[in-house]
Image (cartoon, grey):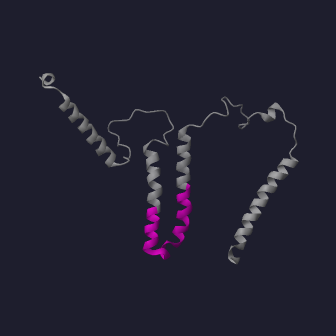
């Protein structure tokens, strides 16, 4: 338990510093509100739209991609320092980790999370985006074939002639 005491003390000191900063800010801040002070500030530019407007979904997709890559880098750096001593088990663990993090990133790229520019025409010769799964494509084709077969059976001989 004694080995965790420095960590516990650091957590306590961090919490006390944060609480003390907020308390001191509340006591030391002058309270003379004006309309200029209450207005939203954005780099000296007056906002052209309502500040309570919602962010587009693409913003969150980019934020998620950024977090995925940050987490990946944070865990890859220590691995590169000790990868020889970990052996095959460490290599398998980091491979699984990379796959788990790169699959969502590939999905974000395939749905266009990083396409911020105006829509462009896509050449018919351009490569297709990353497929999510081949199973879903085969399932949808089988459902279309079954629907077409059901329509063919429902026709009466008079309609077919």
Which SS type dominates the magenta stretch?
helix
* Residue 70, above or below 50: below
What percent of the width, then of the height, locates residue 79?
52, 68
> Which quadrant of the rendered structure holds the C terminus?
top left
Q: How many marks?
A: 0
* Residue 15, above or below 82: above
Q: Quadrant of residue 46?
A: top right
91 part of magenta stretch: yes
* Residue 20, above or below 136: below
Residue at figure coordinates x 27%, y 37% from the top left: 144
What percent of the width, then of the height, locates residue 151?
22, 31
What percent of the width, then of the height, locates residue 17?
78, 59
> Which quadrant of the rendered structure holds the N terminus?
bottom right
In depth, the one of 123 and 47 nearer the eye is 47
Residue at figure coordinates x 54%, y 48% from the top left: 64
In depth, the one of 111 and 19 nearer the eye is 19
Q: Is residue 70 left or right of residue 10?
A: left
Q: Is residue 151 left or right of residue 65?
A: left
In depth, the one of 123 and 53 nearer the eye is 53
Residue range of the region highlighted in magenta in the rendering: 70-96
What percent of the width, then of the height, locates residue 51?
67, 33
Residue at figure coordinates x 32%, y 36% from the top left: 124
């Amino acid at each position: 338990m004694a080995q965790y005491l420095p960590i516990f003390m650091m957590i306590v000191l961090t919490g006390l510093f944060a609480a003390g900063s907020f308390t001191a800010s509340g006591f030391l801040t002058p309270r003379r509100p004006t309309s200029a002070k209450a207005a939203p500030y954005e780099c000296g530019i007056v906002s052209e739209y309502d500040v309570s407007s919602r962010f587009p979904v693409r913003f969150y997709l980019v934020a998620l991609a950024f977090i995925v890559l940050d987490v990946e880098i944070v865990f890859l750096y220590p691995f590169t320092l000790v990868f020889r001593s970990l052996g095959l088990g460490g290599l398998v663990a980091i491979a699984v980790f990379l796959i788990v993090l790169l699959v969502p990133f590939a999905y974000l790229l395939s749905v266009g999370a990083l396409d911020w520019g105006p829509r462009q025409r896509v050449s018919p010769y351009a490569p297709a985006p990353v497929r999510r799964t081949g199973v879903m494509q085969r399932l949808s084709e089988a459902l279309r074939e079954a629907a077409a077969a059901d329509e063919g059976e429902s026709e009466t001989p008079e309609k077919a002639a």
